[in-house]
Image (tube, rainbow, N blue to C red):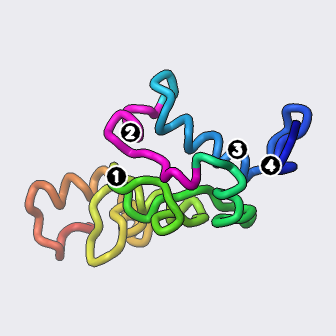
Amino acid sequence: MIRHGQARDGIYSRAYQAWRNMKRRCYSPSYIGFHNYGGRGIRVCDRWLVFTNFYADMGEPPAGTSLDRKDNDKDYGPDNCQWSDNLTQRRNQRRYPMMVNGVPLPELAKQHGVDKVTLWRRINRGWPQSRWFE
């Protein structure tokens, strides 16, 4: 019996897929990224364990977006989640590279035509900022 209308004959809405994957990340040790989520204590708020509540709070994701936690050290819930585009998602990753004056290092490197690894090495080797983009 389908109660929410978001899954039919093995085809799932984007919202339902996001909800299902969120739960897998937090509660399925066999999930490939579990160690980054449930394995480090990230959970889903009780309300969102029921899809219809998740959908009532988040709605359908706008085109080009996916589920994103604003603070990656906090659980999934209405106060900590949003639909975000890929750039916002990358900026919000725990492993995202350093920021320089509020600009992510890869973007800064691209703006100045320098390889991001080269820029990272120059910064970590203590080069003065005046020489970073040579």
Distance between the Cα atoms at labels 4 and 1?
28 Å
Amino acid type assigned to the residue bearing label 4 in the image: Ser
Q: Is residue 35 magenta?
A: yes
Looking at the image, is 92 positioned above or below residue 9?
A: below
Q: Mark 4 — residue?
A: 13
**In the rendered structure, which segment of residues is drawn in magenta?**
33-48
Distance between the Cα atoms at labels 3 and 2?
19 Å
Disc nearer the start of the sequence (3/2): 3
Q: Mark 3 — residue?
A: 17
Callouts 4 and 3 close, C-beta under 8 Å: yes
Disc nearer the start of the sequence (2/1): 2
Q: Mark 2 — residue?
A: 36
Callouts 4 and 1 close, C-beta under 8 Å: no
Disc nearer the start of the sequence (2/4): 4
Callouts 2 and 1 close, C-beta under 8 Å: yes
Across and down, in percent, residue 40 comes to: 32, 39
Which label belongs to residue 94? 1
- Residue 96: quarter of image: bottom left
At a point 37% along the width and 64% down the height, the residue shown is: 109
Q: Going by the image, does 77 lie left or right of 134?
A: right
Amino acid type assigned to the residue bearing label 1 in the image: Arg
- Residue 20: quarter of image: top right
The quarter of the image holding the C terminus is bottom left
Amino acid type assigned to the residue bearing label 2 in the image: Asn
At a point 17% along the width and 76% down the height, the residue shown is: 130
Callouts 1 and 3 close, C-beta under 8 Å: no
Disc nearer the start of the sequence (1/3): 3
Binning the other alpha carbons within 10 Å of mark 4 as few (below 14), some (14 to 19) or many (20 upward) gives some
At a point 38% along the width and 71% down the height, the residue shown is: 112
